[in-house]
């Protein structure tokens, strides 16, 4: 299907594809971009999945020919810029909160990287589920945003300070897009039977943790790999994420909308974690 594109999201996975660390054997040259929004046949649509930006040309263009299975209708009343961020970040947030962690009102939720593109959405979804939410950030200036999204407390701490900042909270669930030195203090802070959901390693992929704490506390370590999501699960998750967006349960925070030639600067900001919410591209 030919889709006239208007907006697209910029995600860490796009930087990994640009570097060749994800989908290194994919065809070259190709257009990047794993999520976007626009119109086709008079309908507002989200494009996502089916190898966009990896196995085939992606969404960072004014128009793209995409498989029919990659086209998802946008509900009436949903902003198209926000909808464009549901293909990767929104789907990740929804699946991590509801499918993997099964967050309920009985949970105490710790969100690492809570001011990031996925983190902001997880904070809002977990709060909408009735959970008590704390959000971690390394920047004092981002604390207010995290609390506005529904967190009871924003914890300003790096890896070395994290355990002292969250020990009293005893979270039942922790969402981690960081890796590196953040994993061990999370393991120590979690209450018995707690769950860790890992969906990224933007700090570093190599971690150290006390396995004795992991098994003695009966903790679960759950990984989310977005590129392994099946077609059916993707469609169901996107439908749910778009509906949560429409209902205000999933909150979309846009840091900046950039022209396409601003993408290299965006890659640098993602690497430095100098983002509050999502960086987006305007394509039309």
Image (cartoon, rainbow, N blue to C red):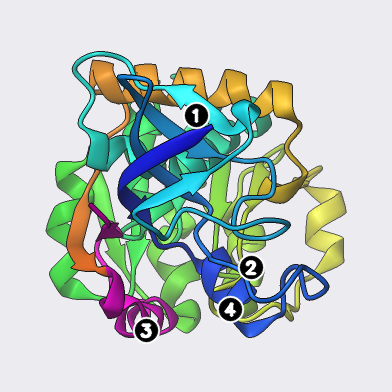
| Residue 198 appears anywhere in the view | yes
Q: Which residue is drawn at 73% across and 37% down?
A: 229
- Mark number, residue 107: 1
Question: SS of the residue at dot 3?
Answer: helix
Report the residue at 62% width, 55% height from top: 199
Range shown magenta: 260-284
The kind of secondary structure element at disc 1 is loop
Q: How many labels does the image show?
A: 4
| Nearest to N terminus: mark 1 or mark 2 | 1
Tell me where residue 101 appears, x and y as whole percent. Answer: 62, 33
Label 2 sits on residue:
183
Quarter of the image with the N terminus in it: top right
Q: Which of marks 4 and 1 is in front?
A: 4
Q: In which quarter of the image is residue 252?
A: top left
Query: Up-down: is 181 above or below 239?
Result: below
Q: Which residue is drawn at 64% across and 47% down?
A: 197
Q: Which mark sits nearer the N-terminus, 4 or 3?
A: 4
Q: Does the magenta stretch include residue 178?
A: no
N-terminal of the pair, mark 1 or mark 3, is 1
Earlier sequence position, callout 4 versus callout 2: 4
Q: In the picture shown, does residue 280 fall above or below 98?
A: below
Quickly name the residue at label 4: 18
**According to the image, label 3 marks what residue?**
264
Task: Give the spatial CA distance, label 3 vs label 2.
Answer: 30 Å
């Amino acid at each position: 299907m030919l889709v006239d594109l208007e907006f697209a999201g910029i995600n860490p996975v796009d930087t990994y594809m640009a570097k060749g660390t994800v989908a290194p054997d994919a065809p070259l040259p190709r257009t990047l971009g794993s999520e976007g929004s626009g119109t086709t046949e008079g309908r507002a649509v989200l494009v996502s999945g089916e190898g966009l930006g990896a196995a085939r040309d992606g969404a960072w263009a004014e128009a793209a020919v995409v498989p029919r299975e990659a086209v998802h209708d946008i509900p009436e009343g949903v902003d198209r810029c926000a909808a464009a961020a549901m293909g990767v970040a929104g789907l990740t947030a929804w699946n991590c909160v509801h499918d993997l962690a099964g967050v309920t009102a009985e949970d105490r939720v710790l969100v690492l990287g809570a001011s990031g593109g996925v983190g902001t959405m997880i904070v809002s979804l977990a709060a909408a589920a009735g959970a008590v939410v704390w959000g971690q950030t390394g920047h004092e200036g981002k604390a207010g945003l995290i609390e506005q999204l529904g967190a009871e407390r924003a914890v300003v701490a790096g890896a070395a300070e994290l355990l002292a900042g969250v020990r009293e909270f005893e979270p039942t669930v922790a969402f981690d897009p960081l890796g590196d030195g953040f994993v061990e203090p999370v393991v120590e802070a979690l209450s018995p039977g707690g769950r860790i959901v890992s969906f990224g390693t933007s700090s570093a992929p190599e971690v150290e943790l006390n396995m004795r704490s992991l098994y003695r506390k009966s903790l679960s370590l759950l990984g989310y790999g977005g590129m392994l999501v099946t077609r059916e699960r993707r469609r169901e998750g996107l439908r749910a994420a778009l509906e949560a967006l429409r209902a205000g349960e999933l909150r979309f925070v846009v840091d900046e909308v950039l022209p396409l030639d601003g993408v290299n600067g965006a890659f640098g900001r993602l690497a430095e974690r100098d983002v509050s919410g999502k960086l987006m591209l305007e394509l039309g």
